[in-house]
Amino acid sequence: MSRKIRMGMVGGGQGAFIGAVHRMAAALDGQIDLVCGAFSSSPEKSKASGRELYLPEDRCYGSYAEMIEREKGRPDRMDFVAIVTPNHMHFPPAKLALENGFHVMCDKPLAFDVDEARELVRLVELTGLAFGLTHNYTGYPMVKEARELVRRGELGPIRKIVVEYPQGWLATRLEASGQKQADWRTDPKRAGISCCMGDIGTHAENLAETITGLRIRELCADLTTFVEGRPLDDDGNVLLRFEGGAKGILHASQISIGNENGLNIRLYGTKGGLHWRQEEPNTLVRLYSDRFSEIYRCGGNFGWLSAPALAHTRLPAGHPEGYLEAFANLYRHFAGQIRARLEGRAPTATELEVPTVQDGLRGMLFLQAVVASSQNGSVWTKVG
Amino acid sequence: MSRKIRMGMVGGGQGAFIGAVHRMAAALDGQIDLVCGAFSSSPEKSKASGRELYLPEDRCYGSYAEMIEREKGRPDRMDFVAIVTPNHMHFPPAKLALENGFHVMCDKPLAFDVDEARELVRLVELTGLAFGLTHNYTGYPMVKEARELVRRGELGPIRKIVVEYPQGWLATRLEASGQKQADWRTDPKRAGISCCMGDIGTHAENLAETITGLRIRELCADLTTFVEGRPLDDDGNVLLRFEGGAKGILHASQISIGNENGLNIRLYGTKGGLHWRQEEPNTLVRLYSDRFSEIYRCGGNFGWLSAPALAHTRLPAGHPEGYLEAFANLYRHFAGQIRARLEGRAPTATELEVPTVQDGLRGMLFLQAVVASSQNGSVWTKVG
Amino acid sequence: MSRKIRMGMVGGGQGAFIGAVHRMAAALDGQIDLVCGAFSSSPEKSKASGRELYLPEDRCYGSYAEMIEREKGRPDRMDFVAIVTPNHMHFPPAKLALENGFHVMCDKPLAFDVDEARELVRLVELTGLAFGLTHNYTGYPMVKEARELVRRGELGPIRKIVVEYPQGWLATRLEASGQKQADWRTDPKRAGISCCMGDIGTHAENLAETITGLRIRELCADLTTFVEGRPLDDDGNVLLRFEGGAKGILHASQISIGNENGLNIRLYGTKGGLHWRQEEPNTLVRLYSDRFSEIYRCGGNFGWLSAPALAHTRLPAGHPEGYLEAFANLYRHFAGQIRARLEGRAPTATELEVPTVQDGLRGMLFLQAVVASSQNGSVWTKVG
Amino acid sequence: MSRKIRMGMVGGGQGAFIGAVHRMAAALDGQIDLVCGAFSSSPEKSKASGRELYLPEDRCYGSYAEMIEREKGRPDRMDFVAIVTPNHMHFPPAKLALENGFHVMCDKPLAFDVDEARELVRLVELTGLAFGLTHNYTGYPMVKEARELVRRGELGPIRKIVVEYPQGWLATRLEASGQKQADWRTDPKRAGISCCMGDIGTHAENLAETITGLRIRELCADLTTFVEGRPLDDDGNVLLRFEGGAKGILHASQISIGNENGLNIRLYGTKGGLHWRQEEPNTLVRLYSDRFSEIYRCGGNFGWLSAPALAHTRLPAGHPEGYLEAFANLYRHFAGQIRARLEGRAPTATELEVPTVQDGLRGMLFLQAVVASSQNGSVWTKVG
């Protein structure tokens, strides 16, 4: 009998931001039930969080280890684990889940460092389990459209890529106030070797490589900590050289005051160009050399969009879909991957439209190169 | 014990547009479970639709009457009925649900005609049940912010209001192709006395009156059917006079090619003005006479937004929320109203932020006046 | 021998706004020399103004009558008179100039009332002299492009036209401060029967009729004076019916706070649509029913623009041309008309791209109908 | 006696682009008369060009040397020389003009190389003559406003600067077609050591240093020639480090298809930020950390703009001023500098708002550093 896919969550207790996002994204399309969680390392807090989510008390666990252990024994056990903890707590539950036969949906960046990332790649290959990474921004329909236009050669070979991710929320020492999001992101023990580049620079890297299908070969990075007393970078400017000769710029910032969540990309080939901005995600500008620009717009009724774009939109044009809808696309497809296994079939191309553990490793390699370049005097450094 | 609120749906079977919207909106915040439905007047189709939604077969009913009858007898019965049928099928299930003690969430316009609307108002008052109307566009946080700015007198008394709702999807005789959405909206037997003005003009009226708190006193309407063979209007231009002396313009169109879902409003008082566009809903432009315009932006982290705006947003700034999120706000608050009853308490102000049956009657009176004005030679006509 | 065309100016002394605009517009293309002027009714002020313009004292006259009389006798006499006075002072110098063989470039609206307008039409026909009217907004290249797209049938027959002209500068009683521009525009003795509709509504009418080639057949107008103590309208909403069945809306306002000079037009035919906004004049949005919108951009290097658009732009794309350049297009072409006469040839199509005295009469008839409609209870009223 | 300032032009004959721009800019405000020119190295072509400009034949010279020699002897001799030739022909006429007592307005970049630039600086200091450089983009009112906001400390110390200048017109080998603008810009003999960076990168550098008042201390540049067979760069990405610790990015491109003339700047200090785009020059976005962004708009009626911004605008808000108006600001102020000398007074602060020969040297040093960095493997390189 057909049923919803069952999710257990690690992290995301009261006061967390990204946990609630994952839950809404998982709920939107009616494919997934949240059935249990280890929402906090305090059993009391975990139960209190679960109660607000209308979960039965016996499925609100005090630790991810307990959750994995106990769920294993249930006939209605969870199908997958969603990991929404800070960076340093991605690897331990992901490893344990994989080792115990649970699929994993993990927040980004994949892990605390490259070694952990490589171990997760190994485990996924070994177990054959489904593993998704929430590089949610590539879940937007217009990102799919952009990727298809590049793939079909509509722009010609790509020459130049400018990808940016400016934010302004860390322009002051917010972490000193105890603000939870700022606190762990600026702490090397929990965030890893980078704040700004790890948190948002990796999204920019993932977006650029996903759309163009080109890999960054080498880079020259100039990271800065503008806010005094902060141990990690809050801004970074990077020159990029891609395989095949394309050049690029990536910059990310958390001190660009007044910028909200300004991820955007511009790319140019020999025949045309594309502009996309996350804050107005339903629009994609297509540029030509010999005619006027076109404003591509998202809309389920626009038959002239590519199949992958249409597979990521729910509404007719002019009914704006946003961040949660793009995030939900990942969950919907990931549920599809699990359903395919339940049904004993191969996943469809659409169901495979979820960033992978390999994408996660790629992000960690990028991050490693960026930090190394900057620490060595902003010299050119190979990726991977 | 705390539990999710239970929803039964009337209409919204396979191929329907708005039914899926209601389901996603109800699911997003994890407050509501879809537990049953009469998705189609064909029992087979209803069951097939329910199966796709992972519902048990015995709660997929062949008619709303059967659903209401059978659910009444269940201990885990639905709490409310969501009505997502064409206009002519709003009243019968709404009436029956109210008469049988079920709360009702109904799509707009409220009913087929003013008489039905008045009867629903009477029944809601009589039964004391919760009744919500999905004028979803007023569920956007920036609409709440606009209303608060007007309420607090920040703009001074309002002088001029321009509200528009241009679409282009009916610029040709789409209904001739059998397209489901076009088919019933252009059919007087199912849509009522108007196509364009009933379907979207009422949204524009609701938006203008909600934000300003002013009622349209009289109007002069020029409706047109541009597409040959169509029995109802597909475009309308209306001059407005509001209580208290404000003047305005409302125009709605389904033949404005290239427009998607362009609901927007501009209003001006003695001290300032506001612009808002549904297609970029997270932005509200505030205009002044003696300083530069400000770009209000939606964001849960913007403490300087009004409480009602903050109560309608889930994410930090720059994470775009869209149509489904605004729609979900209505469902979340409506669930809150029902929960308040379960908990024996009065609903909070936020829970009451759902358009009411009275708003629905108001829309029907507006519609009646618009059609009468136009039919009588576009003469000035009182509303209500 | 080839020489510049010689201009004499009536009005436009120190402190005037539009006089300086006319001078810059006339100077830009190096085709016209300002050689004399009656800048003020006070001979002293006229001379002081002329001195600032580096004119010889003996060509700074104390009245337009003196200027016309004295210039007639000079071998290097002016070729044409530019009239930049308030509305009530358009007719007398225009008439005298025509009667004395001088071509005339006149600010809009053409005259104080319809009778004066008809008399000017008669005189222009009688004398065969060149007469230009500075409906400057139709001098923009993208307005020409829009007109060409309509003419070539690219949009199909036009169904709907929305033309707006919101401003906010008269939201308070600015004229009470003695501000010169506000003072005469709100004075029935100098402005005529209307403030807002005469000053800017006529621009909107001219834009709509110029682009579409359709004439307004009848209208229903609701004019308002929002600012207490002001004897003329400061806002107006008008329903339009065009020859051939198109419907429309025109609204103009001087109390729409925060609006600067927001003339804009949207129009829709059976096959497509166009949007243009004066404040971003180098962009024209073209809308389709079956593909994405295109962003037409002004640029002398864009060979795919129409010839009339190219004939009104001076620069490559991305080098913004503005208000003065559009205004200067009228002067350049008008100078061409005069040069054609000097050279004994017919003017080219481009040289004829200047609004005519007939356009001026059309504006006065529109204005008369608008005011009559509003005064008679906002009833439908024929134009002309 | 008061009179217009007299200009002689070097270059700018038939078919040139920038010569016509200089003439329109000089004409706009009625302060300058074009009295003579050496428009071409061919005397016939020079005379033909002059004839079209209504110049007497005896002041259309066959060479700049002849012009300078002959004008020197006239009582009504030109006041200054405007140099509008390709880069390699800036220095010789500038030097000769200065040596013969003529003021000079020169197109950018200042010279062919740093040595020439230094020599011009020396000559200007020696002679005390007026020297202007047409870094026209800093002539926009909103650039002045931005500079004032920084100067007044409204943004706090500047941390990050992103300045871009994307164009797309050289995405193919246009010079092979003989197109005049492309031809000399891609020719090392006439353009110098760089195409893209010299032609437009220097504008970006000038804009960033002008607004922030900060100098680029060192940079790391990655220049590319994407179009085969082109001997100079057509794209460049540069990391910047400014005096005082600000970081930045500058990129310029002539292969970014679909971009027209996209110069823009974003800058962020500890207290706020600014965004400005040349293609929509009348708008300046001001960003804050604790309130909503403001849309600064250009307008002579906006008393709350800074004095320098108001001194660079001619029209009320909403009457767009563009490229030629900004260019004309330089000519107007330069004419003011000459007039000040004629009147025996010091120039006003406004008259000094013209880029100087020192700005020109600065641009050449920047260019030298960019090219050296790139040629040496994109290593960090000091400027100057």
Image (cartoon, coloured by chain):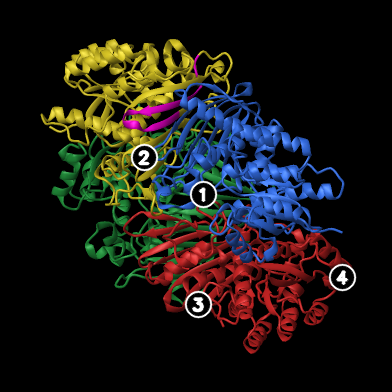
Chain colours: A blue, B red, C green, D yellow
Task: From the top left corner, tell me how far across and down residue D295 is, in percent.
Answer: 39, 50
Circles 3 and 1: CB atoms closer than 8 Å: no
Of badges 2 and 4, nearer the viewer stands: 2
Identify which residue is drawn at 19% across, 40% down: C52
Type of amino acid under label 2:
Glu
Type of amino acid under label 1:
Trp
Tell me if residue B313 comes above or below residue D352 in the rendering: below
Segment colored magenta: D232-250
Q: In this orientation, which residue lies closer to the viewer: A297 or B241? A: A297
Q: In this orientation, which residue lies closer to the viewer: C368 or A330? A: A330
| Residue B215 image label | 3
Residue B369 in which image quadrant: bottom right
Q: Residues within 10 Å of mark 3 (few under 14, many from 20)?
A: many
Residue B103 in which image quadrant: bottom right
Tell me if residue A31 comes above or below residue C237 in the rendering: above
Circles 2 and 4: CB atoms closer than 8 Å: no
Q: Is residue C346 magenta?
A: no
Instruction: Please name the residue that numbered disc 2 is placed on.
Output: A228
C-alpha gap between disc 2 and disc 1:
49 Å
Of badges 2 and 1, nearer the viewer stands: 2
Of badges 2 and 3, nearer the viewer stands: 2
| Residue C276 image label | 1
Instruction: Please name the residue that numbered disc 4 is placed on.
Output: B42
Tell me if residue C129 comes above or below residue C122 in the rendering: above
Q: Secondary structure at mark 3?
A: loop
Q: In which quadrant of the rendered image does the C terminus of chain D lie?
A: top left
Task: From the top left corner, tell me how far across and down residue B382 is, in percent.
Answer: 54, 81
Residue closest to the far bottom: B126
State which chain disc 1 sits on.
C
Type of amino acid under label 4:
Ser
Residue closest to the far right: B44
